[in-house]
Image (cartoon, grey):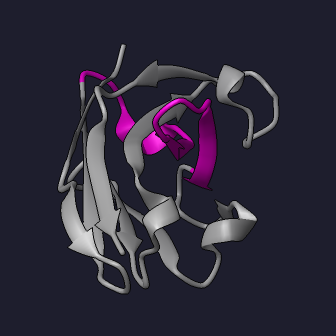
Amino acid sequence: QVQLVESGGGWVQAGGSLRVSCAASGSTFSSYTMGWFRQAPGKERVFVAAITASGGLLYYTDGVKGRFTISRDNAKATMYLQMNSLKPEDTAVYYCAVKGRKAGSIYSLSNYNAWGQGTQVTVSS
């Protein structure tokens, strides 16, 4: 079972940048597709971005394309989400997750079976 720990959240003004990280331990990090999700107050947790095991394929929700970049360093067992041009609507708790090995949509929360504790990102206007 893989354990995930997010870090790097914080407060930033609109238009600013933040990078959040997800450190993994306990399993073979490089074998897994990984994803970032976020949950705003009073809303459901939703997909933000995902990256395949080798890093060769990247996926983004439409609202972050061109602003966010997902990446991973398998040697460090760490995944990143670089967030630029942040908007107040990006305010949420950001979670990293491991996608299960079964076939299923990379965009669906239900296909991820290990989660970090989350890191708060707050963007002020």
Q: Tell which of 97 and 45 is nearer to you.
A: 45
Q: Would residue 108 be visible to someone looking at this image?
A: yes
Residue 34 part of the magenta segment: yes
Residue that protrudes farthest toward the right in the picture: 104
Please state the total of marks drawn on the protein image. 0
Residue 100 part of the magenta segment: no
Magenta residues, start to end: 26-52
The residue positioned 46% from the left and 73% from the top of the image is 87
Q: Would residue 78 be visible to someone looking at this image?
A: no
Q: Is residue 24 left or right of residue 50?
A: left
The residue positioned 34% from the left and 21% from the top of the image is 2
Q: Position of residue 107 (x, y in %)?
A: 74, 42
Q: Is residue 44 left or right of residue 37?
A: right
Q: Tell which of 109 and 72 is nearer to you.
A: 109
74 is higher (above) or lower (below) than 47: below
Q: Position of residue 70 (x, y in %)?
A: 47, 66
Which corner quadrant of the image does residue 56 belong to?
bottom right
2 is higher (above) or lower (below) than 6: above
Q: Position of residue 60 (x, y in %)?
A: 66, 63
Which corner quadrant of the image does residue 80 belong to?
bottom left
54 is higher (above) or lower (below) than 13: above
The residue positioned 33% from the left and 66% from the top of the image is 123
Looking at the rendered image, the quarter that the C terminus falls into is: bottom left
Q: Is residue 77 left or right of residue 59?
A: left
The residue positioned 27% from the left and 45% from the top of the image is 120
Q: Position of residue 85 (x, y in %)?
A: 43, 84
Which corner quadrant of the image does residue 79 belong to?
bottom left
Looking at the rendered image, the quarter that the N terminus falls into is: top left
